[in-house]
Amino acid sequence: MTEVNENIVNICIESLTAQVADSYAETHDISVTEAIQFFMATKTFALLTNPKSYLYLETAPYVEDMLGAELAGDWEAWMEVS
């Protein structure tokens, strides 16, 4: 992967992280900082930050669905989404 492509991947990951955290914060009435810290401790975030997963190419609602399945403990649904 070239340096430019790595930068683009990182921008996509950061953007999705911000969007998911913002939505989670609003839904759960917590600060965005708390939501980011929470999200960063999830398997969904781990997958998002793995460039080989290509999850960074998906939309924020898609990643939010994955997070919701993970939090519900519905690993079958999580695997279907991922």
Image (cartoon, rainbow, N blue to C red):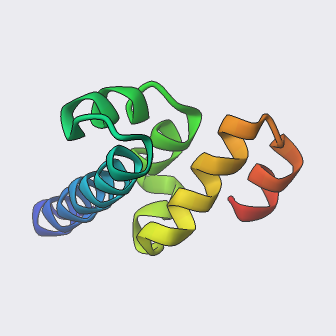
Residue at the image position 41 percent from the left and 53 percent from the top:
51
Q: Quadrant of residue 11?
A: bottom left
Q: Which x, y percent locates residue 59?
A: 44, 75
Q: Camera-side residue: 82 or 52?
A: 82
Of residues 24 and 56, which is closer to you in this image?
A: 24
Q: Is residue 9 above or below residue 58?
A: above
Report the residue at 81% width, 61% height from top.
Answer: 80
Would you place residue 61 above or below residue 80 in this image?
Answer: below
Q: How many marks?
A: 0
Query: Residue at horizontal 20%, vertical 59%?
Result: 6
Q: Is residue 70 left or right of residue 46?
A: right
Vertical position of residue 63 compared to residue 47: above or below: below
Tell me which corner region of the image, top left, top right, bottom left or bottom right, holds residue 1: bottom left
Judge by depth and name the residue closer to the eye, 13 or 42. Answer: 42
Q: Is residue 7 left or right of residue 9?
A: left
* Residue located at (48% from left, 36% from top): 46
Residue 41: image x %, image y %? 45, 24
Q: Provide residue 38's location: percent of width, then percent of height.
A: 40, 28
- Of 50 and 82, the residue lying toward us: 82
Is the C terminus in the top left, top right, bottom left or bottom right quadrant? Answer: bottom right
Q: Give percent across and percent down for residue 75.
A: 82, 41
- Give the side of residue 54 with respect to residue 17, left or right: right
Residue 4, picture quadrant: bottom left
Most extreme residue toward the front is 29
